[in-house]
């Protein structure tokens, strides 16, 4: 028979086969007809049975776990490490698989924080954080939330650039999905290999222009992983509702083409119709399984970024962060600067704007600023005269 647990306030009712039993206080020892349940990390002072009376703390529902024993400890979405209570260790067959002392998330956080701060290089700190990410996602995101200013530069820019360059050499655990030219015709089936049915956000890159490092191919996976980590921690998206993706269409980076540790397709990049057909099949496959998913294009080369955005923006829920996200942020900063100078925000077209870098981000910023000028009443020709673009060669 099917069984389930419903927690309401300080009490729980256990239903078996549709009939409700007598409600009773919920504790970590509650067992519903053999089903597996694990409590999220408890707040201090709300850990044992009997402490629910008079409790006004936030409600945390139990999580149903489809596995037991060592399989829980190897799943970063379910693993709590030494924070599993005695009742949970019995019920989930964990007794003896963990050190005997039970700790809370605050103790665990201080321990990993001390280890990170003991490292001298940012890349070593990044590696420690990703090791934590691969074994305990709850603790990982709690650490980021509580120390966002310290952790964000380690998870994303600038440290993620070095992490991407060394991605193959430091590869440990699968995370995200990869789609290649060899997968053409199979992508609609491949998306069902992803273990979660409720994906809300996909961040995808083809690795063609990773930060300021150029073509890193499949090594660019570090960018979607890092970006989504921040979305989960700072934006509150559940970790099982995000999916990092690399469209591995090859690489024109000679070093990677000949590197023994490179894990991507060691062929030159496909171009033209082959490239766009691959992207199109991916977009259709993702939308087929998750019709309402948001797709974010990240670090595509400037010759592809705007084209892809124009192709899909009216039929898919999608955006390009380099073009739209960076552009919107820059526009807000410039308008704020005009106010600080005592000038009207409508004087945007009278400014002279120099853009250093002709990549998708630089050109995207220019496009957003030009659109804002046109909206203020300037002609397109007049708006274009306000810009000077300097590429990487000066």
Image: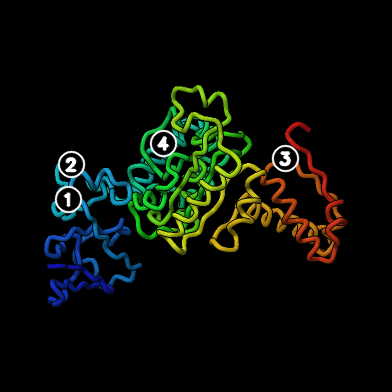
Give the CA separation, mark 3 to mark 4.
33 Å
**Residue at the disc numbered 3:** 357
What residue did someone put label 1 on?
A: 89
Residue ID at (53%, 43%): 156
The mark nearer the N terminus, 3 or 4, is 4
Q: CA distance from mark 1 to mark 4?
A: 26 Å
State yes or no: discs 1 and 2 in contact (Cβ < 8 Å): yes
* Position in image of residue 338 (x %, y %): 80, 58
Read off the residue under disc 4. 128
Q: Position of residue 215 (x, y in %)?
A: 58, 34
Q: Which residue is mark 2?
A: 97
Q: CA distance from mark 3 to mark 1?
A: 55 Å
Determine the image quadrant of residue 253. Answer: top right
Q: Which tag, 3 or 1, sits closer to the chain's start?
A: 1
The x and y percentages for residue 151 are 50, 44
> Dots 2 and 3: beta carbons under 8 Å?
no
- Indicate the quadrant where residue 31 lies: bottom left
Secondary-structure class at tag 2: loop
């Amino acid at each position: 028979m099917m069984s389930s647990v419903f927690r309401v306030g300080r009490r729980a009712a256990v239903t078996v086969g549709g009939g409700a039993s007598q409600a009773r206080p919920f504790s970590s020892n509650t067992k519903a007809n053999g089903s597996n349940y694990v409590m999220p990390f408890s707040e201090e002072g709300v850990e044992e049975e009997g402490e629910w009376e008079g409790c006004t703390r936030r409600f945390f529902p139990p999580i149903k776990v489809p596995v037991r024993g060592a399989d829980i400890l190897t799943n970063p979405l379910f693993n709590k490490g030494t924070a599993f209570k005695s009742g949970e260790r019995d019920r989930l067959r964990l007794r003896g698989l963990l050190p005997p002392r039970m700790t809370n998330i605050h103790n665990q956080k201080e321990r990993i924080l001390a280890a990170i701060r003991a490292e001298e290089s940012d890349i070593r700190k990044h590696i420690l954080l990703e090791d934590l990410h691969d074994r305990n996602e709850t603790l990982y995101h709690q650490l980021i939330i509580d120390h966002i200013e310290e952790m964000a530069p380690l998870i994303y820019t600038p440290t993620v650039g070095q992490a991407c360059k060394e991605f193959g050499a430091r590869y440990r655990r699968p995370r995200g999905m990869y789609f290649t030219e060899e997968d053409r015709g199979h992508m609609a089936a491949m998306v069902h290999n992803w273990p979660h049915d409720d994906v809300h956000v996909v961040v995808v890159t083809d690795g063609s222009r990773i930060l300021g490092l150029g073509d890193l191919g499949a090594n660019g996976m570090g960018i979607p992983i890092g970006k989504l980590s921040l979305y989960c921690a700072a934006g509150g998206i559940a970790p099982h509702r995000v999916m990092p993706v690399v469209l591995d269409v090859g690489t024109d980076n000679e070093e990677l083409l000949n590197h023994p540790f490179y894990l991507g397709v060691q062929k030159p990049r496909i171009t033209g119709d082959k490239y766009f057909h691959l992207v199109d099949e991916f977009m259709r496959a993702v939308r087929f399984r998750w019709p309402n998913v948001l797709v974010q294009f990240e670090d595509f080369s400037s010759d592809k970024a705007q084209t892809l955005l124009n192709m899909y923006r009216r039929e898919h829920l999608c955006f390009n962060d380099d073009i739209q996200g960076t552009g919107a942020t820059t526009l807000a900063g410039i308008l704020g600067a005009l106010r600080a100078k005592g000038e009207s925000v409508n004087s945007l077209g009278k400014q002279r704007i120099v853009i250093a870098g002709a990549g998708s981000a630089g050109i995207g910023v220019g496009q957003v600023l030009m659109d804002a000028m046109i909206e203020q009443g300037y002609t397109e020709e007049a708006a274009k005269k306000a810009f000077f673009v300097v590429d990487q060669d000066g």
